[in-house]
Image (tube, rainbow, N blue to C red):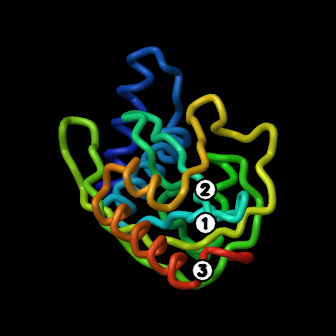
């Protein structure tokens, strides 16, 4: 297996060199490792999302972001990375995608599934664990600010805005729970 892998990387490096890209074997091996990690994540289909919550004018609100490609409203989410706790990864995604800082809870409040569109019209089913993020602030600048829009919604409005049925159901369940507790006070 190692020999076959090395030969594949070597031939890949030669192809890149012939194409004038000037890559060496080390760069080709690094690119191949990244590709393998990406494929492993796709096979697992496991993602984590932050559920950014704040109380505004006595109403519990959730922040949604637009996806980069389809521009639909979603929660900040990403692939679960090796060596990082899922709730910490969810908080990292909220920072990168929406500039949010706050306290993330270590227990997921729910899970939903959706079909992720891949290049070549392929899809993979992703299971997304959702972790509440009690938002303290939104920064003025963040890494993906130019790639996404952000907007605060009431829970029912957010459920109507998202395309994923499982996420909409989760948001509606949270809205019902908020109604039962009176919709007042901190999260």
Mark 1 or 3, closer to the camera: 3
At horizontal 72% and vertical 48% (from top left) the residue drawn is: 99
**Image: 100 above or below 17:** below
At horizontal 54% and vertical 57% (from top left) the residue drawn is: 154
Q: CA distance from mark 2 to mark 1?
A: 6 Å
Where does the image place residue 167, in percent across and percent down from the top left? 37, 63
Between residues 71 and 81, which one lies in front from this camera angle? 71
Q: Which mark is residue 93?
A: 2
Where does the image place residue 112, in percent across and percent down from the top left? 34, 69
Helix, strand or loop status at disc 1: helix
Mark 3 or 2, closer to the camera: 3
Between residues 146 and 1, which one lies in front from this camera angle? 146
* Figure quadrant of the C terminus: bottom right
Residues at discs 2 and 1 in contact (Cβ within 8 Å): yes
- Residue 138 visible, this orientation: yes
Where does the image place residue 124, in percent across and percent down from the top left? 24, 56
Disc 1 packing (10 Å; few <14; some 14–19; many ≥20): many
**Image: 24 above or below 55:** above
Between residues 80 and 26, which one lies in front from this camera angle? 80
Q: CA distance from mark 1 to mark 3?
A: 31 Å
List the residue tagged with mark 3. 182
* Figure quadrant of the N terminus: bottom left
Helix, strand or loop status at disc 3: loop
Q: Which mark is residue 89?
A: 1
* Mark before the other along the chain sequence, 3 or 2: 2
* Mark before the other along the chain sequence, 1 or 3: 1
Name the outermost residue toward the left: 121
Disc 3 packing (10 Å; few <14; some 14–19; many ≥20): few
């Amino acid at each position: 297996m190692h020999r076959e892998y090395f030969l594949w990387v070597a031939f890949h490096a030669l192809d890149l060199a012939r194409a004038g890209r000037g890559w060496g074997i080390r760069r080709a091996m690094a690119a191949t490792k990244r590709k393998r990690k990406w494929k492993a994540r796709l096979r697992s289909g496991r993602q984590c999302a932050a559920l950014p919550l704040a109380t505004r004018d006595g109403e519990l609100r959730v922040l949604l972001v637009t996806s980069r490609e389809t521009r639909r409203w979603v929660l900040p989410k990403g692939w679960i990375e090796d060596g990082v706790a899922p709730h910490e990864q969810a908080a990292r995604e909220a920072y990168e995608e929406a500039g949010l800082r706050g306290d993330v809870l270590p227990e997921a409040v729910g899970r939903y599934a959706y079909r992720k569109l891949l290049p070549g019209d392929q899809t993979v089913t992703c299971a997304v664990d959702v972790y509440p993020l009690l938002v303290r602030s939104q920064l003025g600048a963040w890494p993906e600010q130019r790639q996404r829009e952000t907007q605060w919604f009431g829970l029912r409005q957010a459920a109507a805005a998202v395309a994923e049925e499982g996420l909409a159901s989760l948001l509606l369940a949270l809205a019902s729970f908020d109604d039962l507790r009176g919709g007042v006070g901190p999260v």
